[in-house]
């Protein structure tokens, strides 16, 4: 069976997390969210984690080479021998170059970049409609999952709040940063013929079906 070495790309609120969960279930691939594995490395105080911590403690960005090494530690694990699903790395063109080199040295290559897109207005509508209850953090959505009593949690009656992260201005800013960072990356992967686009405004089942079909085709092509 050919490997499925995949990168998941997309703005916040386009349903990346949901799709990642399903792909992990379908293909048994390990899922590596870069932020999480970096934090884990720091917590475990591995050699690389300790190195990363020094940068973080100084408030500096962790260099691309170092993030890539932390990622490759996972990619080299037996569980990732048939492939992996990477989220949050690479985010920039230089990171993509570092990753390509590291994979090449292992005689591996990326199978595809799965870009789950959604227009900014849709993302803002989805995220800014979220409300979280003050006491227990129960999550509602004004449009998709409204509480029975407007403004209050069904389960504990505490008031529902809009998190700062979900405020429309904040979401727009996150989206601007995302687009600035990933546009050159998307263009690079498009040029390399690796990019596959999915419409994150569709129902999650439909998006999932499209991704599955795409991966099945890619696997067939690789085996020819
Ligand atoms: Zn609650």
Image (cartoon, rainbow, N blue to C red):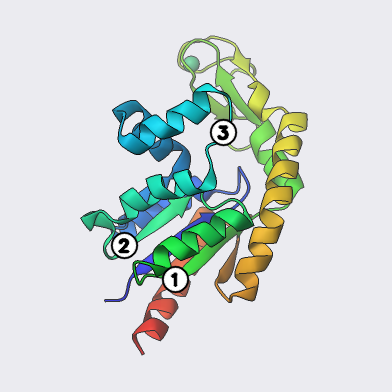
Question: Going by the image, does 94 lie left or right of 7?
Answer: right
Pointer 2: what residue? 27
Q: Which residue occupies 73% across, 52% down?
A: 119
Pointer 1: what residue? 111
Tag 3 near tag 1, CB within 8 Å: no
In x, y percent, where is residue 109? 42, 70
- Looking at the rendered image, the quarter that the N terminus falls into is bottom left
Mark whose residue sits in front, 1 or 2: 1
Question: Going by the image, does 216 lie left or right of 138?
Answer: left
Q: Which residue occupies 48% across, 59% down?
A: 99
User: Farthest residue toward the left?
Assistant: 78
Q: Is residue 156 visible?
A: yes
* Marks 3/1: CA–CA distance: 37 Å
Total numbered badges shown on the rendered structure: 3
Q: Nearer the viewer, residue 4 or 119?
A: 4
Which numbered marker is on residue 145?
3
N-term mark: 3 or 1 = 1
Where disc 1 sits, the SS reads loop
Q: Which residue occupies 70% across, 60% down?
A: 184
Where is residue 34, by image quadrant?
A: top left
Where disc 3 sits, the SS reads loop
* Marks 1/2: CA–CA distance: 14 Å
């Amino acid at each position: 069976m050919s490997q499925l070495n995949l990168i998941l790309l997309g703005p916040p609120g386009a349903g990346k997390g949901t799709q990642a969960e399903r792909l992990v279930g379908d293909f048994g691939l390990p899922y590596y969210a870069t932020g999480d594995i970096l934090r884990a490395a720091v917590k475990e105080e591995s050699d690389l984690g300790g190195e990363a911590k020094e940068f973080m403690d100084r408030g500096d960005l962790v260099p691309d080479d170092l993030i890539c090494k932390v990622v490759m530690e996972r990619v080299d694990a037996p569980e990732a021998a048939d492939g992996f699903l990477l989220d949050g790395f690479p985010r920039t063109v230089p990171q993509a170059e570092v990753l390509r080199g590291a994979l090449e040295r292992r005689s591996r290559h990326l199978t595809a970049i799965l870009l789950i897109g959604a227009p900014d207005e849709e993302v803002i509508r989805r995220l800014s409609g979220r409300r979280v209850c003050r006491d227990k953090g129960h999550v509602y959505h004004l449009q998709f999952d409204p509480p029975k009593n407007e403004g209050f949690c069904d389960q504990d009656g505490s008031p529902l709040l809009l998190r700062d992260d979900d405020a429309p201005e904040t979401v727009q800013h996150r989206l601007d940063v995302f687009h600035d960072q990933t546009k050159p990356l998307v263009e690079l992967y498009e040029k390399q013929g690796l990019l596959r686009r999915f419409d994150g405004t569709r129902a999650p089942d439909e998006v999932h079906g499209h991704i599955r079909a795409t991966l099945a085709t890619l696997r067939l092509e690789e085996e020819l």
